[in-house]
Image (cartoon, grey):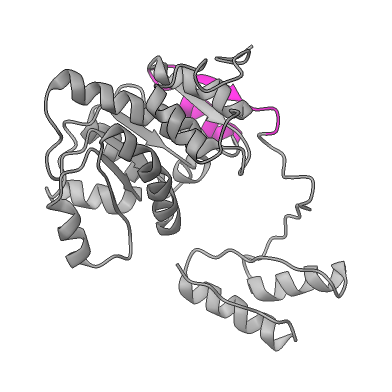
Amino acid sequence: MGYGARMSTFSELGLAPELVAALESAQIVNPTPVQRMAIPAFLAGKPAVAVARTGSGKTLAYALPLVQRLRAFEDAEGGPSLPARPRGVVLTATRELVTQTTKVLKTLTHAARLRVRNVSGGESGHDTNITLRQVCDLLVANPPRLARLVEEGKIDLTDVRIVVVDEADTLLAPGQRGAVEAILSAASVASPWWMSATMPEPIRQWLMSRPEKPTLLMSKDAHTAPESVTVKNIPCRHTSRGDAASDVLVSLGPTARGIVFANRRETADEAGAALRERGHDVVVVHG
């Protein structure tokens, strides 16, 4: 039985009344399984890895204890944070996720009187400089962007008390892990919080080998997709994503619909063009 498994309300999980009130105003009353597991563990400062599928409430599972603990740190240490010297950091995989996570956190930080800022890849230097001049209790960022700003001396992580690594299955993959490790080293945080939708065996082994020996909090649906979603793995390293998606749509019939994700604008445009050439109605959306 995991942390908080028998607790049925946010108050029972240990959340402060102002955070419970903020949830109730958003008509969020009952914690999800991953929230029941993760919130008590993170409130207690336990090193943990929480794994649950997308759409299961992972963001609130770390955001609620993060805000509560940062408020407690600020009260105990006397005085607010300083510009470019956050006390909490959330790392996530894409610019779009930085924006989404910031929106969720702002609904909670208002009640706790904390200021949340963000930096991400693709934004202008002017926008970043504006962010760096503002008081920042909690920073949401893409790891490569933040690691570069730390290396340049533009952000100081010595005051950081909590680091959350969201989308750990993506951020700890080869080519991504170096920036995360650089940030953790600069912040000197002994027990980061880890969140993930899946837990590939190499990443599990790496996490379990860390000095803090985090507890693995695994939701029953961690490796499953929603029942309405059909999962197909189609290698397309040497094939256009658009062509591969078209083949799937054709195989599923004339009413089939789908989404193609791409990590670059150019790739998204190429996939859209390939689908149009094969007669599909397509809308391309950039971050």
| Count of numbered badges drawn on the protein | 0
Left or right of 138, for residue 277:
right
Q: Position of residue 140 (x, y in %)?
A: 33, 46
Q: Is residue 136 above or below residue 47?
A: below
Q: Is residue 241 above or below residue 53?
A: below
In the image, 52 versus 150, the foreground residue is 52
Q: Foreground residue, 116 or 17? A: 17
Q: Is residue 75 above or below residue 248?
A: above
- Residue at figure coordinates x 30%, y 32% from the top left: 112
Q: For residue 216: magenta?
A: yes
Q: Could one spot residue 193 in this view of the protein?
A: no
* Quarter of the image where the N terminus is located: top right
Residue 138 counted in the magenta span: no
Residue 262 position, x and y percent, is: 54, 65
Residue 125, visible in the rendered structure: yes
What is the x, y in percent for residue 148? Answer: 23, 52
Q: Is residue 240 left or right of residue 268?
A: right
Q: Magenta residues, as a range? A: 200-221
Q: In this rendering, would 253 be left or right of 40?
A: right
Is 232 on the left or on the right of 211, as rendered? right
Q: Residue at x 27, y 27 (%)?
A: 71
Residue 23 position, x and y percent, is 48, 34
Quarter in which the C terminus is drawn: bottom left
**Residue at (55, 27) in percent of width and height:** 35
Identify whether 59 is placed above or below 153. above
